Structure formats: structure tokens, C-alpha cells
Image: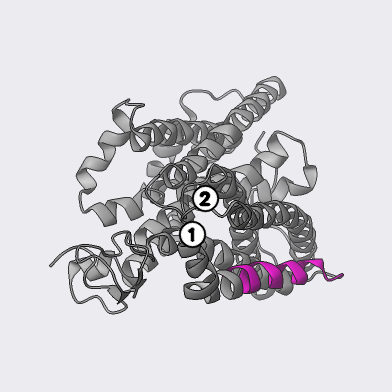
Amino acid sequence: MTHGEIWTAKEMFVLPNEYIYWSIQIVMYPFMTGLVAGAFVLSSLYHVFGFKQLKDIARFSLVFSFALLPVAMMPLMLHLSQPLRGIHVMMTPHFTSAIAAFGIVFLTYACIVASELWFVYRKHFVDTVQGLKNKSDRNGMDNLRLKFFSLLTLGATDISPAALEKDHKAVTVLAAIGIPVACFLHGYAGFIFGSVKANALWMTPLMPVIFICSAVVSGIALCILCYILTMEIRKFRARRKGTAGGATVEQLKGVEDYEVRVSARYLLIFMILAVTLELLDIIFRGYTAVKSWEILRSVIYEVDFTQIFLLQFGLGNLVPFILLLIPGLTVKRAALASALVLFGVFMMRWNVVIGGQAFSLTFAGFMHYHVPIIPTTWETFREGLAGALLVITTPFVLFYFLNKIFPVFLKEEAH
């Protein structure tokens, strides 16, 4: 059976060998890389530009960005069925191939984030080692942790004010370098689509810029949502035990309200930018009315009208925009708005990837993609809802374990 035949439904005149080849995993790929880049940019707003209001959520975003990083290529691995070859992309410099260039950028970005994390948490590693060494009744687990954290210090145990100041400068430099690399990392995804001359919907020079802006939006929204969920868990523990990490329920609530309100302002700014660019692109296409505009108009205003204007722009942009603009923003309202923003960005990716394959090369027929819900075969698992859920949940599992090494709610600043 031809790849794509299972989930493709055809309408009117479509060539016999035409199917929806790029499935939900190719939708997940730019969505996940966008979250990586967006979370890093949010953390850099504090480290580079000195937005001290974001101090608490910046460290959270940095660790979450690191948890998202390994998952960025996971959709491609599932889609291509050749996971063992994936490492070649990162280890083989070859700038005449966009995907190979992406591998180099991806590896560079991973090194930057890992280095920044090390400088941010170096004091925590040294403090942990000292605490374990001074512990008189160490058990086997303590000895294991002692060796592990000693290894993480890399022998740099100087935590004098001068040494910590150097760490802080290193974090600033790395974050400054990381912002363009993160943008390039995600702009590449837009570049891939925008450079496909054979597809009228994808080919636009605005595509990389649109992808970068929506990436920042989705990363900030995800960090706000996860930050709220994490703080709610901490408040629940504080109610049961009296405190959580030395903070009372009232203190946690105050920090949560402040951080969420400040982050929501930046989310609004990037939302305006992203939506403006997307609408400009549609208006520009209609104004220039190139040869392919007739079929594009049919896809945008008829076939995919619900997905584009109701779900993406309506539910995913307009509703959260209003929710965030109404005075007296509450944590619950911010959480709902962030969830809707994530949905809107996902629908934007969906409309680009699936919508771009919706019309036949004959310009006389359409194809519809039906997501495999129940995995009956390996192909329907990896290209269906189950595979997408696997990709979405993996970063949260990684974040749980990373939080044991890089605690996002340290009582004092690590630098």
C-alpha cells in the first residue's frame, strides 16, 4: 500500500499517485522546534535584556527548553522510520542541504543551552556536593549523588563572588548568542516550506519570519501554562505540609500572579506581531493574485475555512487576545488563554502542512487528511494520534527528571 493511502480522502479530479504524504508528525515537527526556540527566547529576556520581572520564570523556561530539545527531532524520526540515521544529520556538515544545515544549527544550539544551564547551576552543583560531603550518615544513594554532582561541577568548585560574577557574564553572553541561533533553528523550518517552489501555498519569503514569530508565541504560552501548573502543585503541597520549598501558600500565590501577569504582556506583544504577519501574507497573496491564486482561494476561503478562520484565527488568536486584554488578569484566565494560544499555533502549523497538500497538482481536485485515531499497525501508530501524543508527553517526562538535577525553583539565584 502506498504511503499516505490509508489516511487520504480524495475529492474531484486528483492524480492517482497523489496522497497526503506529510502527516501529523510533520505538523508536530515545526510545532515542537517552535516551542524550543520560544522557551529559550523567554528565558533570554531576563538574562540578556535584564527584564528582572521575569527572573523566576526565566530559569523555568531555560530548563524546559532543554527538556524540549531532544524531542524536536522525534517527529522526523517517527515519520522517516530510520531513527539510527538521524545522528548523521548533526555530525555531517553539508550546507547544500537544508536539513543537514539544520543538524549543525541544532547541535550548536544544544551546546549553547547546555553550557548556559551549567553556568546557571554551577553554584547549586558545588553546594550540593558540599552538603553531601558534610553529611555524616550518607547511604548508597547519597554516595551516588555525590559522584554525579561532583562530575557535573567539572572540577570548578570556586563559588566566590568574583567567580559567580564571571558565571553571570558567561550566561549573558551565551543567552545573547543563543537568541539568533534559536531563531535560525526555527526559521529554518519556515525556510524549508517557503522554498518549495512546487507548492503555491508554502512558497513565500515571509514564511520563515512567520514561523519565528509564532514560535516565540507558542514557547511563551507553553512556559506560562506549565509554570502555572507547577505552581499549583507547589501550592497544593504547601497547603498539606504548611510550606513548599520554604514558601507559604500566600507567598507562592503572590509570585505566581506577578510572573504570569508580566509574561502575559510579552505574550500579547508577540501575538500581535505573529497575527499581523500571517494576515499580511494572506492579503498580499490576494492582492497580487498570481496564477495559482484561484486554487489557493478555494483552499483558504472554502475547503479549510473552518480550520483557518474559526479554529486558528478565531479560537486560537482572537479569543485568547481578548482574554489577556480584559483588565484584572487572573491566573485561571491566563492559563486558559495560553492553552488556546498553543492550540492556535498548532492549527497554524496544521494549516500550513496539511493545507499545503490539500489541493491536487491538477488544480482541479482536493485531498483530505483523516488522522488515524486507533493504531492498528506500526504506520498508523507513528503517523496517527498515538504518535503525536507520544511526542507531546515526552518533554514533560524529561522535564520531571531534569528538575531533579536543575531545580527550577531554587531558593536563591544560582549566579
Image position of 319 with respect to 22: above or below: below
**Residue identified by numbered label 1:** 349
At 30% from the left edge and 29% from the top edge, which residue is drawn? 91
| Distance (Cα) linking label 2 and label 1 | 10 Å
Residue 73 visible from this viewpoint: yes
Residue 235 visible from this viewpoint: no
Q: Name the one closer to the observer, 23 or 124.
A: 23
Of the numbered discs in the image, which one, if any, rests on residue 285?
A: none
Of the numbered discs in the image, which one, if any, rests on residue 34?
A: 2
At 70% from the left edge and 43% from the top edge, which residue is drawn? 412
Say which amino acid is labelled 2: Gly
Asked where in the image residue 168 lies, by quadrant, the reply is: top right
Residue 348 point in image, percent of width and height: 53, 61
Say which amino acid is labelled 1: Arg
User: Looking at the figure, which quarter contains the N terminus?
Assistant: bottom left
Side of 398 relative to 19 (left or right): right
Q: Name the one closer to the observer, 157 or 201.
A: 201
At 66% from the left edge and 63% from the top edge, which residue is drawn? 244
Residue 78 point in image, percent of width and height: 27, 56
2 and 1 marks in contact (CB < 8 Å): yes
Image position of 118 with respect to 186: above or below: above
